[in-house]
């Protein structure tokens, strides 16, 4: 019998290395496996996709076609779930976090020139020395000499963090070049925070959204009021606040609630999550509170107002809230540019009230009280009053204290009104909140 030649050692080592690599790769791919598409829908998708590519009068982009198919699959689940394609991720992140990369300054076109209204406190623009009234004439050498360029000034100024932008400005008759390092800028979500009656110690705070820094901003604003004078009561305005981070909502609630449940999350698995207070985080357990809400107060706004109402910590004034009590989880995957916002649960108030209006109506159509938060004091508004409230709360912001005088001078020069907080004579919900807060203080 002829003897087979012996395999060289290097061949055995390489062969075992290849086998081991294949095993590791197979294990990884197995862990990443997803359910295959079922027939006949898989075949239908492939056939329709190919036929559209081959026959539609306008040749479609094959990637855009599939993006729409994925979006349609998610959009049909409920009104909140959403597929976020790669092209929309940056915009989605900015909207949901209030964070963007830029210099952090409010700039508006007046008399054919871009004028700095004010830099945001702590922003790169403030640190670089920009001031209210600076007239921006060029950005990185691009002259703002025509209307189209001025309208595009925000895009010219923005850019990745850790890069610089040079603003050519006119100030007091001189032209200066100011180099501003771009950075991460957090939009203020506390838009108004001040005393509405300093003598009686009545404070007012409007929270526009539960961004990832909402709780620190709210707590800092209340502390600032306490440093200005005696704070005997607070109106927390959540009108037109569409919600956001549950964690921020819980931290704000814990600042006012000394004990008990804040909310319960119902999940498909039946493994509910109960969110509790934390006595060590309670800063103002007895501060009289009134919470303003309307039909555009949703999600985290409803969780917070529902918890304060159930615990008797606040009087709720305004209109029945939107009724968005579904929990949305945002999924992302490593090496994937898209995101998926998916409804994964629903909220209940401490007393077990169902916040989600759609789920409530599915359970029973007889109980019309389910869904949303019903105010203790309901106040209707006319269309004109509603538009006024929207403009004040959504489209304006309280100027930073350190720039108020210089900003007022800019407003006078260019003849535009300085932003004002809600006024009782034009906002009946705000007027009712003031009355309710005074009564609550007197009853203590």
Image (cartoon, rainbow, N blue to C red):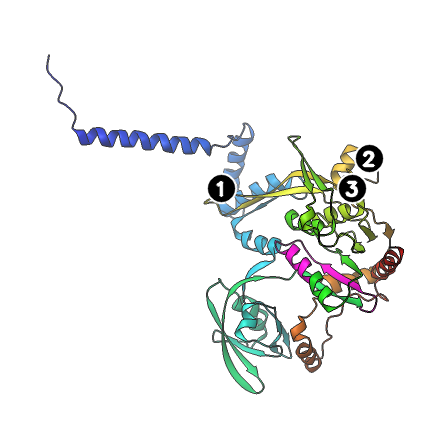
| Disc 2, SS | loop
Looking at the image, tell me whether mark 1 or mark 2 is earlier in sequence order: 1
Numbered disc in front, either 1 or 2:
2
Residue carrying label 2: 365
In front: 157, or 119?
119
Residue carrying label 1: 54
How many other residues sit within 10 Å of disc 3, few (<14), some (14-19) or many (≥20)? many
Whether residue 444 is visible, yes or no, is yes
Tags 2 and 3 touching, CB below 8 Å: no
In front: 291, or 177?
291
Q: Which residues are magenta?
A: 198-221
Numbered disc in front, either 3 or 1:
3
Q: Is residue 212 magenta?
A: yes
Q: Position of residue 82 (x, y in %)?
A: 61, 44
Q: Position of residue 422 (x, y in %)?
A: 79, 65
| Disc 3, SS | loop
Q: Position of residue 73 (x, y in %)?
A: 60, 39
| The disc label shown at residue 371, or none | 3
Q: Residue furthest front?
A: 280
Q: Is residue 344 magenta?
A: no
């Amino acid at each position: 019998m002829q003897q087979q030649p012996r395999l060289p050692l290097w061949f055995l080592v390489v062969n075992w290395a290849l086998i081991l690599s294949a095993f590791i790769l197979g294990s990884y791919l197995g862990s990443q496996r997803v359910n295959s598409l079922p027939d006949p829908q898989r075949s239908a998708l492939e056939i329709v996709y190919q036929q559209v590519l081959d026959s539609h009068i306008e040749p479609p982009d094959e990637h855009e076609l599939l993006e729409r198919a994925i979006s349609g699959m998610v959009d049909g689940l409920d009104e909140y779930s959403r597929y976020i394609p790669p092209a929309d991720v940056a915009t989605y992140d900015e909207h949901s976090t209030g964070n963007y990369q830029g210099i952090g300054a409010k700039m508006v076109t007046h008399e054919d020139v871009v004028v700095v209204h004010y830099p945001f406190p702590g922003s790169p623009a403030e640190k670089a020395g920009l001031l209210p009234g600076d007239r921006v004439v060029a950005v990185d050498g691009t002259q703002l000499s025509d209307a189209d360029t001025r309208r595009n000034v925000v895009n010219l100024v923005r850019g990745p963090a850790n890069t610089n932008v040079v603003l050519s400005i006119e100030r007091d008759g001189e032209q200066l070049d100011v180099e501003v390092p771009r950075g991460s800028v957090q939009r203020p979500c506390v838009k108004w925070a001040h005393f509405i009656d300093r003598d009686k110690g009545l404070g007012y705070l409007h929270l526009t959204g539960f961004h990832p820094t909402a709780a620190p901003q709210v707590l800092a604003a209340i502390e600032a009021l306490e440093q200005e004078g005696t704070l005997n009561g607070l109106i927390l305005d959540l009108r037109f606040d569409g919600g956001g981070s549950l964690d921020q909502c819980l931290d704000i609630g814990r600042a006012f609630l000394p004990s008990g449940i804040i909310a319960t999350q119902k999940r498909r698995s039946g493994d509910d999550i109960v969110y509790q207070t934390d006595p060590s985080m309670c800063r103002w357990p007895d501060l009289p509170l009134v919470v303003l809400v309307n039909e555009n107060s949703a999600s985290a706004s409803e969780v917070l107002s529902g918890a304060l109402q159930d615990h008797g910590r606040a009087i709720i004034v305004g209109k029945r809230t939107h009724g968005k009590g579904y929990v949305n989880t945002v999924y992302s995957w490593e090496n994937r540019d898209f995101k998926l916002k998916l409804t994964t649960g629903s909220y209940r108030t401490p007393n077990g009230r169902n916040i989600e209006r759609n789920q409530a109506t599915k359970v029973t159509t007889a109980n019309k009280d389910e869904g949303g938060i019903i105010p203790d004091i309901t106040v209707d508004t006319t269309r004109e009053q509603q538009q006024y409230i929207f403009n004040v709360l959504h489209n304006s912001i309280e100027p930073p204290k350190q720039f108020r005088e210089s900003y007022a001078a800019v407003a006078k020069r260019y003849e535009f009104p300085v932003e004002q907080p809600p006024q009782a004579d034009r906002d009946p919900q705000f007027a009712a909140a003031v009355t309710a807060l005074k009564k609550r203080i007197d009853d203590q």
